[in-house]
């Protein structure tokens, strides 16, 4: 397990108010960069790949310094790592330690990884031994494209400083019947803009005994879709007063036992 190799001291002391983050430049060609295998590469190659992807799409607006958060405690500059697994584990750890600012940065990185993998020329089908990352779509056999614009479910919650937030679930482009994957977008009703990040949740990867509310929302929206319902299960949970959601952070910090849901429905 990576758990024994991570200290995450950088995460615990992590601050985004870096006055002058330095830009990382690379002289590598685009062909060299797109051939990088993020499952087995050095940190320098990983950084080049992610900075290249950010340059293609400014929506991936992570800071250069946030890339360091995925390094293991015994980091070796010359050693190759599986940065897809490391990023996913870092996201889960950020949630566990309650550092949602860092989680937001890691989510941007994870989205950039997803985009890079979709357009990457690298081919490496070696399986993941630790955590099956939500963004590793190359391991899925894509037989047909789902209706990605159709909402499976939505709800409105308080978003803290962002005001009211609409959360909407749709199928991700790489979802299949055998491996359903849900994409979640966030819309600021007050500001009338979509928030930068989205969550990509593999239904099969959810740990039902202690699912985050975001995972519960994705799971219930998917199950409602199968049962020809819309905005049913999660809304019912909200009005039951068994949980209280005051901000978007609560969707990650609070948890629900989905085994209860399976028994009820």
Image (tube, rainbow, N blue to C red):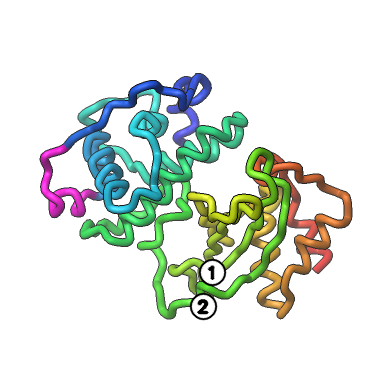
Marks 2/1: CA distance?
Answer: 7 Å
Residue position marked by numbered label 2 in the rendering: 147
In the rendered view, would you say 42 is above or below 139?
Answer: above
Look at 81% across and 57% down and name the residue there. 237
SS at badge 1: strand
In the rendered view, would you say 123 is above or below 253?
Answer: below
Does residue 222 appear to the left or right of 195 in the view shown? right
Mark 1 crowdedness (10 Å alpha carbons): few <14, some 14-19, many ≥20: many
Residue position marked by numbered label 1 in the rendering: 171
Query: Residue 4 placed where, x, y %?
Result: 48, 28
Q: Which residues are magenta?
A: 26-36
Look at 12% across and 43% down and name the residue there. 28
2 and 1 marks in contact (CB < 8 Å): yes
- The one nearer the camera, 175 or 258, is 175
Query: Residue 176 placed where, x, y %?
Result: 49, 73
Look at 54% across and 69% down and name the residue there. 171
Does residue 130 appear to the left or right of 162 in the view shown? left
SS at badge 2: loop
> Residue 35, which numbered label?
none
Residue 250 lies within the magenta run:
no
């Amino acid at each position: 397990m990576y758990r024994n190799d991570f200290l995450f001291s950088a995460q615990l002391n992590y601050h985004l108010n870096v006055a002058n983050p330095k830009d990382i430049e690379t002289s590598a060609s685009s062909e060299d960069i797109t051939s990088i295998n993020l499952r087995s590469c050095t940190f320098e190659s990983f950084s080049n790949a992610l900075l290249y992807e950010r340059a293609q799409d400014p929506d991936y607006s992570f800071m250069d310094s946030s890339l360091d958060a995925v390094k293991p405690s015994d980091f070796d500059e010359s050693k190759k790592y599986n940065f897809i697994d490391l990023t996913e584990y870092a996201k889960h750890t950020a949630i566990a330690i309650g550092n949602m600012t860092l989680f937001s940065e890691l989510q941007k990185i994870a989205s950039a990884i997803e985009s890079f993998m979709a357009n990457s020329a690298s081919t490496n089908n070696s399986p993941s031994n630790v955590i099956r990352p939500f963004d590793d779509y190359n391991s899925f056999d894509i037989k047909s494209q789902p209706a990605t614009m159709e909402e499976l479910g939505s709800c409105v919650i308080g978003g803290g400083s962002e005001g009211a937030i609409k959360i909407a679930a749709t199928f991700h482009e790489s979802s299949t019947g055998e491996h359903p994957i849900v994409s979640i977008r966030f819309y600021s009703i007050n500001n009338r803009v979509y928030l930068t990040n989205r969550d990509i949740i593999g239904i099969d990867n959810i740990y039902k005994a202690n699912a985050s509310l975001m995972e519960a929302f994705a799971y219930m929206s998917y199950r409602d879709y199968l049962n020809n319902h819309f905005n049913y299960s999660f809304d019912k949970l909200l009005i039951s007063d068994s949980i209280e959601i005051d901000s978007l952070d609560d969707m990650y910090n609070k948890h629900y036992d989905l085994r209860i849901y399976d028994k009820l429905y």
